[in-house]
Amino acid sequence: MLPKLKLISHTLCPYVQRSLITVLEKQIPCDREYIDLANKPDWFLKISPLGRVPLLLVDGEVLFESAVICEYLDEITPDSLHPPDALTKAKHRSWIEFGSNLLAKIAGFYAAKDQETFEAKRLDLIANLELLESQLNAVPFFAGEKFSLIDAVYAPIFRYFVAFDRYQNFVFSDRTPKVNAWREVLLQRPSVQQAVAENYYELLDEFLKKRNSFLTELIK
C-alpha cells in the first residue's frame, strides 16, 4: 500500500514538472498544492530546508530535491523508469545532473542584463545542446523505445526552448536534429502535457517580461 503523498508545487517550476511527469507516468495517487514562491507561506519555510519546490510530503515526512523525489517515486512503484544495468543507470544519473546544470544556464540566459552577456549565454546553450546531441543514438527516447526518468527531466527543459522560439530564432536547434526529434516526441507525451497548466506559455511570458533583462526588451 502506497503512503499518502502530496507534492508542494509552483506553476512554472521545471523541477516540479519532472516530479509530476514521474507521478503521471507511474499513475501514482498524489495530491498537489501550489504556492506562490514570491510570497512563500510560513508553513512552507518551516518544512523546506532549501526554501525551494518541489517538496514531497510522504505520510507527513518531507522529501526535498526533485531528483531524490523522482527516484523515491520510482522505487515505491513497479516497472522502474531507470535502466536495470548499474553502469547505464549511473550514466543516466550523470546526464540528469547535466540537465539540472542546463536549467541553470537557461536561467542565466533569460536573466542576462546586457547584450554581451546575453550573447555569451546563448552560445553556451547552443554548445550544451550540441554536446547533448552527441550522446543521442537511440529513438524515440534517450534510451530507445522505453520512457525513462531522464526523459522526465529533459521535457521541462525543452519547453523553455519552445517558448524562446516564439520570440525569435536564436539558432538553438539548427545543428541538433536528434535533440529536436527527441524534444518533439517528449512534448507530445500526455504526462508531459498534463504536468503544466493549459496557459503555461502565457504564464511564462508574464514571468519573463518581469525579469528586466535583455530578453525582456526583445519580447516587448
Image (cartoon, rainbow, N blue to C red):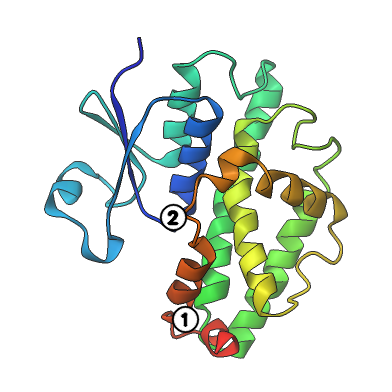
What residue is drawn where x is 83% and y is 37%? 139
Q: Secondary structure at mark 1?
A: helix
Please say whether residue 98 is visible from this viewpoint: no
Q: Nearer the viewer, residue 67 or 218?
A: 218
Q: Quadrant of residue 149?
A: top right
What residue is drawn where x is 86% and y is 55%? 177
What amino acid does circle 1 point to? Lys
Q: Position of residue 168 (x, y in %)?
A: 71, 80
- Picture layout, residue 219 above or below residue 141: below
Please say whether residue 18 is visible from this viewpoint: yes
Mark 1 neighbour class, 10 Å CA radius: few under 14, some 14 to 19, many 20 or more: some
Residue at the spot of label 2: 13
Residue at the front extreme, as displayed: 198
Q: Position of residue 78 (x, y in %)?
A: 53, 13
Q: Secondary structure at mark 2?
A: loop
**Is 17 left or right of 63, judged from the image as shown?**
right
- Picture layout, residue 6 above or below residue 11: above
Q: Nearer the viewer, residue 112 or 15?
A: 15
Q: Dividing the image into 4 quarters, which one contains the C terminus?
A: bottom right
Q: Dividing the image into 4 quarters, which one contains the N terminus?
A: top left
Give the spatial CA distance, label 2 vs label 1: 17 Å
**Is 82 left or right of 172, judged from the image as shown?**
left
* Image disc number at residue 209: 1
